[in-house]
Image (cartoon, rainbow, N blue to C red):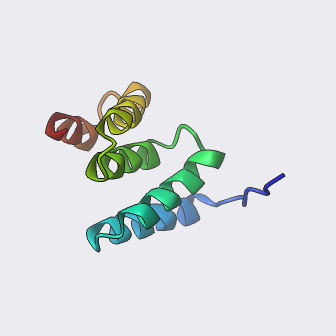
Amino acid sequence: MEQIKEYTPNELNSLCDEAVAMYSAGEYVQSLAVYETILKKFPENQRALHGSGVVLHKIGRSDDGIVSIRKALDLNPDFADAYNNLGNI
């Protein structure tokens, strides 16, 4: 069985920042892998759900991206960036 590392809130933020930087550099698969790592341990992490949704759309998996972003919005109906990106899909 795969061990999942315990993360502090600061480490989670750093991982999300790393995923955003990878996305910005065009490293979409790597970015998605980071988000998926976070979501294995924290399936309700709004930032990772939103970010993975954006990446999924970018790599041609728009339906999956919509599902992921909607999960983020279900958890936080005031997540303006998620609404914006959902509208762009």
Left or right: 2 in relation to 30 = right
The x and y percentages for residue 29 are 42, 62
Rendering quarter of residue 87? top left
What residue appears at the point 33 percent right and 27 percent down from the top-left corner?
77
Residue placed most toward the observer, 41 or 52:
52
Left or right: 39 in relation to 31 = right
Is 25 drawn above or below residue 86 in the view shown? below
The x and y percentages for residue 78 are 29, 32
Query: Farthest residue toward the left?
Result: 88
The x and y percentages for residue 74 are 40, 25
Rendering quarter of residue 9? bottom right
Left or right: 57 in relation to 11 = left
What residue appears at the point 48 percent right and 68 percent down from the top-left corner?
14
Q: Quadrant of the C terminus?
A: top left
The x and y percentages for residue 70 are 36, 29
Left or right: 10 in relation to 67 = right
Query: Farthest residue toward the bottom?
Result: 25
